[in-house]
Amino acid sequence: MSGFSADWLALRAPADARARDAGLARALAAWAKARAEARGPIRVVDLGAGTGATLAALADILPGVRWRLVDHDPALLRLAAARGAELGAQVETLAADLSRDLAAAFDPAPDLATASAFFDLASADWIDAFAEAAAQAGAAVHAALSYDGREAWTPPHPDDAAVHAAFLADMRRDKGLGPALGAGAAAHLAQALRARGYSVAEARSDWDLTAPRDAALIAALAEGKADAVRASEGWRAARTAATRARIGHVDLLATPG
């Protein structure tokens, strides 16, 4: 599942591209090169693939890999497949409900499991099941852009702390993969993988948004947050007109021991 519209995914794409950690991407490229030399072509499963953002971000550093893109939305997968074709990638798609079809996503066993802006939608139990599936497959994991709860908006507003606390609580609703961990998901994923013998590296991948360049994304974030927690109209108006917002994310690369 991605759970988001193609319009939202397109709106956030430039901020995502700027935020992804280049150091972890280089480490992933080096790992994949060594793995391919030892075992042949790399198989990648991308969970919550949406319109193919992960594939597009990693295509240049993972040449010749075989992608399996998994999402619950066939319409998004058609867009992702077309994107992969434009990039010359080897792509297959799987429309699946990951709340019950995780095993199907890992059949055949991949060398690498990826996801972008996905794990904060999942529960602790689901993340544990994912970590176990990855470990059983012997797959590395690259999880990008997991929201970690850090936010700073300019100019500040007196209601910021209360609205943010309510938003973090709202994030823990069930989004289809059990009661979501929200801002705690990245840390839980890292712990679950370490417990299974993985070497885990993490790096911040924050959105640094400034108006006017990112005005539309800033406004969309503010509107979504205000709607989620029924924030005051004063807060909504101030936040949609914010000049800057820094939104905290984390990238992770885990390789099996």
Image (cartoon, rainbow, N blue to C red):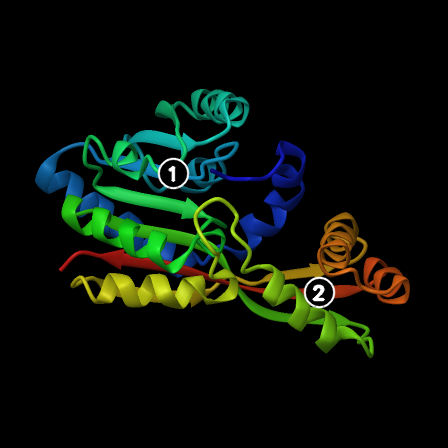
Q: Is residue 45 left or right of residue 257?
A: right
Q: Residue at x 28, y 51 (%)?
A: 129
Q: Position of residue 117 (x, y in %)?
A: 50, 50
Q: Amino acid at mark 1?
A: Leu
Return the residue nearer the eye: 208 or 241: 241
Q: Furthest-left residue in view?
A: 38
Q: Position of residue 200 (x, y in %)?
A: 27, 65
The 10 Å Cα crowd at callout 2, few under 14, some 14 to 19, many 20 or more, is: many
Tag 2 near tag 1, CB within 8 Å? no
Return the residue nearer the eye: 199 or 22: 199
Q: Which quarter of the rendering shows the C terminus?
A: bottom left
Q: Residue at x 38, y 38 (%)?
A: 98
Q: Position of residue 66 (x, y in %)?
A: 28, 29
Q: Is residue 116 left or right of residue 5?
A: left
Q: Residue at x 10, y 38 (%)?
A: 39
SS at mark 2 in the image:
strand
Q: Residue at x 76, y 54 (%)?
A: 227
The 10 Å Cα crowd at callout 1, few under 14, some 14 to 19, many 20 or more, is: many
In this figure, which residue is indicated by the disc labeled 1? 98
Q: CA distance from mark 2 to mark 1?
A: 32 Å
Could you say which quadrant of the image residue 103 lies in? top left
Q: Is residue 199 left or right of residue 9?
A: left
Position of residue 9 relative to residue 75, above or below, is below
In this figure, which residue is indicated by the disc labeled 2? 245
Q: Amino acid at mark 2?
A: Ala
- Of labels 2 and 1, earlier in sequence is 1
